[in-house]
Image (cartoon, rainbow, N blue to C red):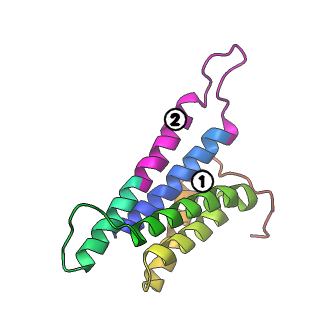
Amino acid sequence: MRIVFLVALLGGAVFYSYVAFIDLSFFNQRGRPGAGFFPRIVGVAMVVLVLWAMVDALRDRRAAATNGFHDGLGDTGSGWQDAAKLVLLALTYAVLLRIFGGFVSTIIYLGLALSVLNPGRHLQNALVAVIMPIVVYLLFDRLLNASMPPALIDLPF
């Protein structure tokens, strides 16, 4: 379940960073730090730290799968492949945010990320991939009146 939480947290961190980089200016007209200065720093730090936590969680999971033996040196093969997949998924999510908007791209991202990182649990992955974006949409768009990122391609729903 730690992997599922971290995948959802990575999605939130990428979403936060996307908004900080697209909607907020880094400097104001006078050349001073603008509204996007600290959110950009925080967003990038969040993405890096969550990726680091995910690599650590994947390494721990792999060590537990090999009878609990873990020498502290880390995996040289599959751990790095998992980390590369996570980076690719995060970049894909950033692109999907621009094309499909926040709601649809979050469902796609969570579905892909959970199918890669939590294999074999199709029902759990599908439920998390659909329920999490619905909750975020209801919280931000309806309750807090903060809009989700707009889409370049408007979908009929």
Check disc 2 and report its element: helix, strand or loop: helix
Horizontal side, residue 152 vs residue 141: left or right: right
Does residue 82 show up magenta in the picture?
no
Which residues are the magenta region? 22-51
Say if 44 sits above or below 112 in the image.
Answer: above
Check disc 1 and report its element: helix, strand or loop: helix
Amino acid type assigned to the residue bearing label 1 in the image = Arg
Residue drawn at the location 64% of the way across and 62% of the way down: 92
Say if 14 sits above or below 30 in the image.
Answer: below
Residue drawn at the location 68% of the way across and 20% of the way down: 28
Say if 41 sits above or below 62 in the image.
Answer: above
Which quarter of the figure has residue 72?
bottom left
**Camera-nearest residue between 39 and 89:** 89
User: Which comes before the other along the chain, label 1 or label 2?
Assistant: 2
Does residue 24 show up magenta in the picture?
yes
Residue that numbered label 2 is attached to: 41
Residue that numbered label 1 is attached to: 142
Viewer-nearest of discs 1 and 2: 2
Amino acid type assigned to the residue bearing label 2 in the image = Ile
**Could you tell me residue 156's position as x and y percent?**
79, 70
**Could you tell me residue 99's position as x and y percent?**
75, 59
**Residue 4 in sight in this render:** yes
Q: Quadrant of the N terminus?
A: bottom left
Q: Quadrant of the C terminus?
A: bottom right
